Image (cartoon, helix red, strand yellow):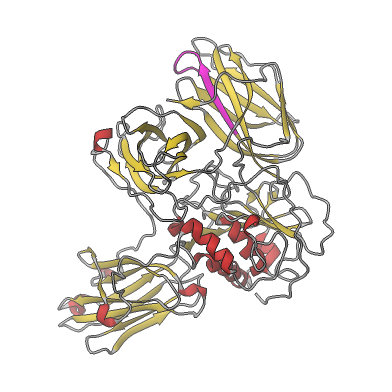
Amino acid sequence: MTPVPKIGSSFEYLEDRALPSTFGVPWADPEHLTLSFVNDGTRTPLGASSLAQLLGSSSTSAEWKREILRAFQTWAVNANINIGLVSDGGQALGAVGAVQGDTRFGDIRIAAAGLSPDVLASAAPFSFTGSTLSGDVVLNANAPIGSLYDLYSVLLHEAGHVFGLDHEHEGHASAIHTGYEYQTGLSAEDIEHLQSLYGTRTPDTFEGAGGNNTAARASAIPRNSVTQLLATADLSSPSDVDYYTFTAPALTSWLSNVTVRLKAAGLSLLTAKVTVYDAGGRVVASGASTDPLSNDITLTFNPGLLGGNYTIKVEGASGNVFDVGGYKLAVDFLSIGGLLSPITTTLTGVLDGHTDDALASARALQTNTGADARFDAVYRGVIEDRFDVDTYKVRERWFAPGAAVTLNVMVWALDANGVDPRVRVFDAAGNAVAFQVLSNDRGLFSVQVLNAVAGQDYYIQVSAREGATKTTGSYFIAADFNQLSPLVFDPVAGGTTAPGAATAGETLQLSKAGVFQFALGAQTGAVGDTVTMTVYDEDGNVVFMLTARVGQPPVTATKYLTAGKYTVRYSGAATNKGAVGYGLFLAQLSEGVGPYATSTASPTTSTAPSSTTTSSSSSPAASSSPSYSYAGPSSGQPAGYYYTY
């Protein structure tokens, strides 16, 4: 969209700084991020989204969508980040699901809702709590974004927050000033801080020692099937050029033409040009896309009865940031009835056939040894049946040997309504290691091990939850050793419930709205017995419920709650063998003036609204002055913190 002059600047901190953020945590799989534009009417914490209504009708949507993509791509080209555009299924923001890789919507979701009048937009970074709120960007539907305020400048700022950078990184020319600034790109400091999280962009495996940027150094395309060759690669800079060679078999033209396809849609925002040359250097097919909204390319040519050798050249087509990104290049020799083998963007897990069920046969995961903060180990596995246990070995290789570190482990299902995974952690001697549950929601399990030791081996086992209705499926596992301040839950309530009985109502009072993480543990009682917590609003409507089982890890829920009074009741199942002792723990993940704000804030004295963030607490305490209080007969310190196994 047409840039507009910058209007003023504000350097006021508009968030409540009592809640330090978990900025500095990179996405677990940054090379496979996705982005979607939320449809108008989709539920957000502050009402229905109105993104298209804010930015323009369908006749101009391509223009403003490209500006938003340009803002994210400006960051992505400088690090190991790819962003694929996908459709949005219309699920509510914050819906339970995979924090990354959910097939229903993008990891990054762009929406609009009514925010405080002194706020232009809000964004949430990746979080160890695993909520799908991570990556969500909400524009203020009541602000003149796109006219008075430059859309690219606003989204460039928010994209920095999505990638994990806080205002504390701002410099004189930084894109993440606290207040609005007209922007034309990133500062050297912005790029430096981004690369400290994700590393400098790494050339793909086809580059080799000398690269494949000339026809003389062209790479052979690997065979994917009898009739298809397939390469997964990357243009890692605007000047990068990739060359490939292949041989069309004789009689190919008698059976079918040769089809060359470049797949970028859903993988990256790359706009490329593809040229096919015969053995004499003559162009036999060529095509390009300069639109990141439609960036696939398909070429067809007839090689003749004798076949022959051909060279493919892949290069950027736009002369801007969209000349960088990942892609898949396929060559098809046979298409019956015009049908071609699909080029999928789905990342599937690896079947192991029960070869890693024990610690002694653990799969050693390659760990990050670079100076950047990417996760130390990531992998995609499959729980093949209800007896399957996948075992992994990881070791921290960056901090000084013997240093105290925190080990974070996250596992989530990759399939819709997929497996409900659980993890256990063991030390190098095979002893079970105590951990704290950060998230235990449908399809997600996230834990932190305090006081792990750098330089030592740890084993992680992944299996399906006992009693789950779905015990098979693909999952993503991410492990990270770090020295970030661990997330700490406040113990707020503890007590007992009798079989079939409910406790008297207790009160949760919120002075400000925010995102809260609830953790409920059934701490004592007969194994298998349960306790259910039900939270009601002031009108008596059920807000949500949690059911914890004795002998199993605590269960969690991430919820946005408006300011006000809530009633909390605990009940035991009628089938319980006796009383169940329970404990409730609470962490306040955000508050303030973002999309999860209590109400519209008073305007600042600045002439321009600011941009703010929604983030998670990484302080040893959830807040120095929490915006909630809990009162009732059972309130107080529950019995023990929620270590498990």
Taking the magenta stretch, the answer to whether it contains residue 226 is no
What secondary structure is the magenta-colored segment mainly?
strand
Residue 493 position (above or below residue 455): above
Taking the magenta stretch, the answer to whether it contains residue 527 is yes
| Whole-percent x, y for residue 516 in the image | 63, 37
With 263 as the anchor, is 522 left or right in this view? right
Residue 341 position (above or below residue 416): below
With 468 as the anchor, is 635 left or right in this view? right
Residue 153 position (above or below residue 93): below
| Whole-percent x, y for residue 306 in the image | 15, 83
Magenta segment: 518-530
Quadrant, the C terminus: top left
Q: Nearer the viewer, residue 564 or 488?
A: 488
Q: How many marks?
A: 0
With 624 as the anchor, is 294 left or right in this view? left
| Whole-percent x, y for residue 7 in the image | 77, 70
**Residue 542: which quarter of the image?**
top right
Q: Residue furthest top?
A: 578
